[in-house]
Amino acid sequence: MMRALFTASTGMHAQQLNVDTLAHNMSNVNTVGFKKQRIEFQDLLYQTIRRPAADENRNEPVGLAVGLGVRPAAINTLFAQGNLQHTENPLDVAISGNGTGFFAIQVPGYEEPLYTRDGAIKIDASGQLVTADGYLYLGPEALEENFTDVSIAADGTVSYIVSGSTEPQTAGEPLQIFKFSNPAGLQRIGKNLYQATANSGEPVQWEPESDSSITLNSGYLEMANVQVVEEMVNLITAQRAYEFNSKLIQASDEMLQTAANLRR
């Protein structure tokens, strides 16, 4: 009975973390480029009471072992493609292609670039292409003064027209897009940014001439890949599992109380 108390408590703790993960997904349902997370569980150690045996003295094909509960094993990021939303803003760019591909971002305080799926590009006072937090998109150079008619091509090339001219100019190199062999190994650091790790593999720059697995869509944004109905079903399941574990604790407590009252 005491064992059941602690086992059920591990279930409650695991489901609480499950609900926390679902809440994070739901709160970011309108976050551009957000990728939902899924928690994974593992069973804990087993207390072996009797091992299976097959010898001249015993023939017991099935042993007796009692599990000691559950623990959260990992929170995995699912990089499935999100829906594209048409914005009619030429500075909005969505990366499509099974959730692969990331914009490279220069962030102060980091030696290496960070990466994002957020293509809501802004232009700051110096003509540079930046995120909503002012972090620089790597590739294009700063636009000249009095620019108009900014456009982004399918290969990431940024073009614009200077006031008084009719010839489009190119802002240096195209937007730098990188792929990873294991995107789930990227480390989330907030603000729609990811950091490369040893588990994610080295970033490989996208070459539009030879790699058709990625498409850039100007005038679109990739929305979060969170499915509200699916998350609500998962929330109901987690809530019921939490409730069942709490009932187990109550039942174990009542059994202990019954055993304690035997001498009355």
Image: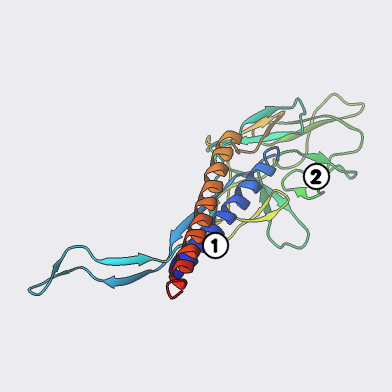
How many angstroms separate mark 2 from mark 1 (CA)?
28 Å
Q: Identify the disc placed on residue 26.
A: none
For the residue pair 166 and 106, the one nearer the viewer reads as 106
Nearest to viewer (mark 2 / mark 1) = 2
User: Label 2 is placed on what type of residue?
Assistant: Ala
Q: From the viewer's perspective, is 48 left or right of 235?
A: left
Q: Amino acid at mark 1?
A: Ala
Q: Position of residue 244 (x, y in %)?
A: 50, 52
The image shows residue 58, relative to residue 214, as above or below, that is: below
Judge by depth and name the residue closer to the eye, 185 or 228. 228
| Occupied quadrant, residue 34 | top right
Where is residue 18? Give x, y as percent.
57, 52
Q: Quadrant of the N terminus?
A: bottom left
- Taking 151 as reference, is 237 above or below it? below
The residue shown at (43%, 76%) is: 263
Identify the residue shown where x is 60% and y is 47%.
22
Checking the image for residue 198, the label placed there is 1
| Residue named by callout 2 | 132
